[in-house]
Amino acid sequence: MIKHTDIAIIGGGVIGLATAYHLKKTHPKKSIIVIEKEDSLSSHQTGNNSGVIHSGIYYKPGSLKAINCRKGKQALERFCDQEGVDYEQCGKVIVATSENELPAMQKIYERGKANNVTCKKIDKTELKEIEPHAAGIAAIHVPEAGIINYKKFCSVLAQKIEAGDGQILTGQKVNFITPSREKVNIETVEGIEIEASKVINCSGLYSDIIAEKGGSKSEMKIIPFRGEYYELNDNAQGLVNNLIYPVPDPNFPFLGVHFTRMIDGGIECGPNAVLAFAREGYKKLKVNPNELIESLTYPGFIKLASKYWKTGLGEIWRSFSKKAFVKALSKLVPEIKTEHLKTAPAGVRAQAVSLDGSMVDDFYFSRNGNILNVCNAPSPAATASLNIAKVITEKIDNG
């Protein structure tokens, strides 16, 4: 039996669900089906991130990241207020620990101001008032940064979608996508067939694979990077009040190891960023040979690795050495000791890499007939999700 629908959305993470929610809200008469390969929603990037509501301070003014983060943050907070989803504007500090970090800190501050982020430069005395155990010579205080449980947010989105007669199919892995002029046929491994007028690919770690199944020539490849975390023991949680971040390396797209208070309790420390040996390689020893070979032989990754090999070795060393991980954390909070940390679940980031070896930093979309591919949706995609959904809807309406 074939299911007919106006719009099929592949992927039940935060972008897929936010898109389905926005489409049902703006086009209530359209039929929508969300297809998720796992038995539960938001099982991968959405459910394994640090739960931060980003302010938009880091992003280049005018970029899709900056625009969508600022608008999406406001939309997210309005939604949570209306639907009773817990979140907290706890604030964060971005800490410079040496003189050579001050120029990069200043650039972040200027970006924040250009993006209309509420932020203030503070000295080490003011830093101690906010985070008594943090060490730094200067910092930026961002009071509007916040925390949330994105899985709970997604659960409410799913309820709203189904209440609006949208369908969510879990445990259905897409096997074939056959586009034609008027329709797109989707067949799952489990034998479900769906005929859709339009398809939106929100499949995260597999976005390039799904795009290729739909006939798109991929302009980039997803390279999975595992982010490993520790959690502070109960007796050390008093060392951190809220969010403590370093000044990030301006040449590297990751923010560096940091401290994050979680909305449901506890303090997370991390992540690092190491090549995962599988797209869903949450464990060090999980290997998917085909996916690993794909990553290692991709010309873009070879160029990327040759450029950042020193940084990469440092990340790998921190992965295997708890002492090295603690050393990085202690730059921000010197009282942190090895015995304060217990292992926490890891996440995997879908990093899009171009053939020339550059990491695709901004949100990126491509179209192939009636299929719209969300090719790259890095952090702050969860924060920005409701506005990204609006952008996707506009692209679908105009396509």
Image: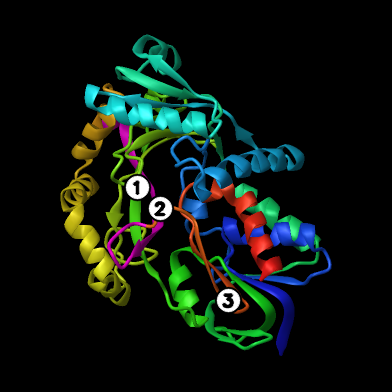
Which label belongs to residue 253?
A: 1
Identity of the residue drawn at 34% across and 64% down: 354
Position of residue 277 measured from the top left corner of the image (x, y, whole percent): 29, 65
- What residue is shown at x 66% (from left), y 53% (from top)? 155
Residue 353 forms part of the magenta stretch = yes
Q: According to the image, label 3 marks what residue? A: 172
- In magenta, the rendered stretch is 339-359
User: Residue at 28% of width from left, 54% of height from top?
Assistant: 274
Mark 2 or 1 closer to N-term?
1
Q: Is residue 216 left or right of residue 306?
A: right
Instruction: Name the amino acid, label 2.
Output: Asp
- Whether pointer 3 and pointer 2 mark residues with C-beta atoms closer than 8 Å, the reply is no
Judging by the rendered image, the residue that carries numbered circle 2 is 361
Query: Quick check: can you spot residue 125?
Result: yes
How dense is the environment of label 2, judged by Cα within 10 Å: few (below 14), some, or many (20 and up)? some
Amino acid type of disc 1? Pro
